[in-house]
Image (cartoon, rainbow, N blue to C red):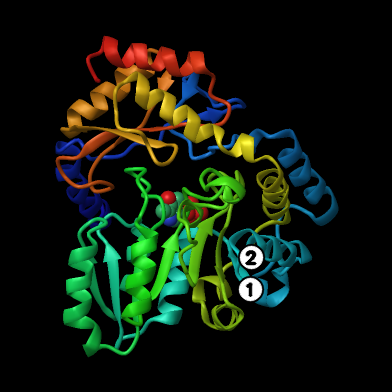
Amino acid sequence: MTSLDTFAKEKLKPLADQGLQRHLQLTERTSGGKAQRDGRQMISFCCNDYLNFTHHPKVRQAAKDAIDRYGAGSGASRLITGNHPLIAELENRLARLKGTEDACVFSSGYLANIGIIPTLIGQQDIIFIDELSHACLRAGSSLTGAQIVTFPHNDMDQLQSQINLLRPRHQNALIVTDGVFSMDGDLAPLDQLSRLARDNDCWLMTDDAHGVGVIGHGEGMGKGSRHMFDPLPDIPLQMGTLSKAIGSFGGYLCASKPVIDLIKTRARSLIYTTALPPASVAAALAALDIIETEPEYCSRPLKNARLFARLVSLPEPASPIVPVIIGDTEKTMKFAKLLEDDGFLVTGIRPPTVAFGTARLRFTFSAEHQEEDIRALTTSLKKHGIV
Ligand SMILES: *Cc1c(COP(=O)(O)O)cnc(C)c1O
């Protein structure tokens, strides 16, 4: 065995011993929130495809038409020859949806965050980040060389104290948070955050990967977490992904024109990676058409999550993500397996994705889940004593 293989084996062993080795499982997702695994048809409660757009006829058709007209790949980075006109159209549409001057599309949400944050923040600056923020916000922050201060989840008093203490010692300051927290499904207090940011000269950045398409009040339905607040909070940096409710692939930042101009000039994960394939862009555009015109459809995932929570006596969820915290990692994975045996796909989430002692079953609900699917799921959960 080579020293490299020995290294890999030794590094993995303690993780495997703690039940933390990960295995990729072949899964074929089909329409209507269903999936096939090991030749079995299952109902999936663990996809981020909240609006089932990955299989929506109009979205699929748009992607096929784009392949036939423009080809399968984009052929270069956006700054070389990969900047297809469809991308400019998508940026206009995203800016309109989020109410900003301009937008920049990246080739994934992860790439967006590791490009945006180091473009805006440097060594002399400071980043305040919610402890439950997504891993790629943390990855982006760590590329800056800035001081990084983690604040306890949604704890505005602690954040205020940290700002009082540390803000004066730095040039620029960024507050970073998920809009909808990906493993807990709760919302950031964007009204308070935007006030704190304004009063202390900090820039506020939200990652609304799980908000766009599925939350928002009234006219703002589908526009994301900012639209859960009245008056609308001021959020100068609104990041998101095209890969969840929008059903395609890619990431974006919506912001002012000067900020977007800088991002397009300096963000390394935009400059040094290949542009999205035209099919992904066309699919996202078709999905945005539906999001802008069918608010009732966009509200269904949250309605389904609320039905589920009522049936198992959990607090009313704020998003289509509903965690059931088990605690123990092994027990969580065993429950996931029991549910799988009953025909329900629910992923067990374990450390380091979540903190030790907070392993959980994370249920996500989509527009196409039927009431009887949700009732059958709750029956199975009760049968196994999970809730
Ligand atoms: C999924 C996710 C991302 C990454 O987006 P991709 O487009 O999948 O790379 C970023 N932030 C949050 C909060 C996410 O849930």
- The verdict on label 1 being within 8 Å of ligand 1 is no
Q: Which mark is residue 95?
A: 2
User: Neighbour class for label 1 at 10 Å: few (<14), some, many (≥20)?
Assistant: some
Which element is circle 2 on?
A: helix
Image point (54%, 29%), residue name: 28
Which element is circle 1 on?
A: loop
Residue under label 1 = 101
Q: Sequence order check: which comes first, mark 1 or mark 2? A: 2
Residue 240 location in percent, x, y? 51, 58
Describe residue 96's horizontal placement relative to residue 342 as left or right. Answer: right
* Viewer-closest of 249 and 327: 327
Residue 142 location in percent, x, y? 31, 72
**Among all residues in the image, which is located at the extreme right?**
69
Do callouts 1 and 2 mark residues in contact (Cβ within 8 Å)?
yes
Q: Tell me if I can see residue 39 in this picture.
A: no
User: Neighbour class for label 2 at 10 Å: few (<14), some, many (≥20)?
Assistant: many
Image point (23%, 88%), residue name: 168
Q: Amino acid at mark 1?
A: Glu
* Viewer-closest of 145 and 210: 210
